[in-house]
Amino acid sequence: MEKIYGRTKFICEDQVSGFCPGCMHSTIGKLIGEVCEELDIIERTFLITGVGCCGLHMEYVVCDNVTAPHGRACAVGTGLKRVNPNSVYISYQGDGDLASIGLAETMHAANRGENFTVIFVNNGIYGMTGGQMAPTTLVGMKATTAPKGRDPKEHGYPMHMCEILSQLTAPYYLERTSCNTPANVMKTKKAIKKAIQNQLDGKGFSMVEIVTSCPTNWGMDALSALDFLEEKMLAEYPLGVYRDRSKEEV
């Protein structure tokens, strides 16, 4: 029988995922691995993970990797890419890491058009660190630091990173995807592959934002979290391409 699903060479064979049931980090990690294997770049790939659940990937991947200080993955990526431009650098960050603590690093790396790839996992909350409100937490959505729900008068509104970065001149490619359905999983893989290929071609800054669920900190089971993602998260964060310079070059 033909094997239709299995590990990629990117993932350590002796490791079992420690992510919570219903979490999409493991799916995204496998997609990155499949793309790196298909592009034959595993040996030259370097993963830069943010603090939190993203950092767990350092236990699962065979490529070189480092966990950056909280929020500083884009700064670390900038230094590494400039020192060794022939390697492939992938920043893997959550919403608190990229859009709050690391907002300045993200914005300036994008504004300079740094030639690396950012994978931005947006589940609307701080995951491993305790379920605090993140910049992407929805209005009315509860968090440990907003027990009555996010109130725009007190906390401001959710931040939309693809839309924000699309106002800058330098970013080459910005797309928002999800992994909530098989079709969207395939679209996410295609977006990741495009973003990494852009780096290989020297095109500059590419970011794929992936809207995901966090059943544990949302206080839901995996299936209810999927419903919430479709009904609420995707209404706030529409999927689609927000910048693709390759189409302007045609």
Image: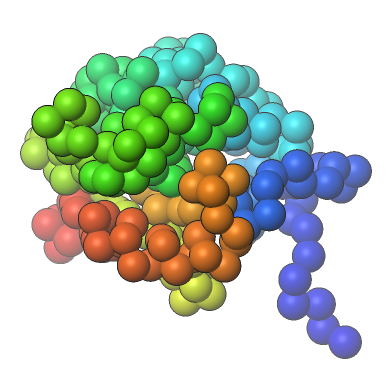
Spot occupied by residue 23 in the image (x, y as percentages of width and height): 60, 52
Q: Please name the residue shown 53% across and 17% down the image.
A: 68
- Assign the C terminus to one quadrant of the image: bottom left
Q: Quadrant of the N terminus?
A: bottom right
Identify the residue at image location x=60%, y=61%: 222
Relative image position of residue 179 (x, y in whole percent): 49, 62
Q: Nearer the viewer, residue 158 or 147?
A: 147
Most foreground residue, 164 or 38:
164
Q: Residue 237: x, y in percent?
A: 26, 55
List x then y, in percent, for residue 198: 36, 47
Q: Is residue 11 left or right of residue 31?
A: right
Q: Residue at x 50, y 60 (%)?
A: 225
Quick check: can you spot residue 89?
no
Relative vertical location of residue 112 with respect to residue 223 in this rendering, above or below: above
Task: Work out whether residue 142 can be spotted.
Answer: yes
**Quarter location, residue 35:** bottom right
Vertical placement of residue 67 versus 181, above or below: above
Q: How is the image coloured?
A: rainbow
Residue found at the far bottom of this picture: 1
**How many callouts does the rendering have?**
0
Q: Is residue 119 left or right of residue 152?
A: right
Give the quarter of the image for residue 106: top left
- Identified at 69% across, 44% down, the residue is 19
Horizontally, is 162 left or right of 220 in the view?
Answer: left
Query: Hey, which residue is sitting farthest front in the picture?
Result: 148
- In depth, the one of 87 and 210 nearer the eye is 210
- The image quarter containing residue 203 is top left
Compared across the picture, whether 70 is left or right of 136 comes to: right
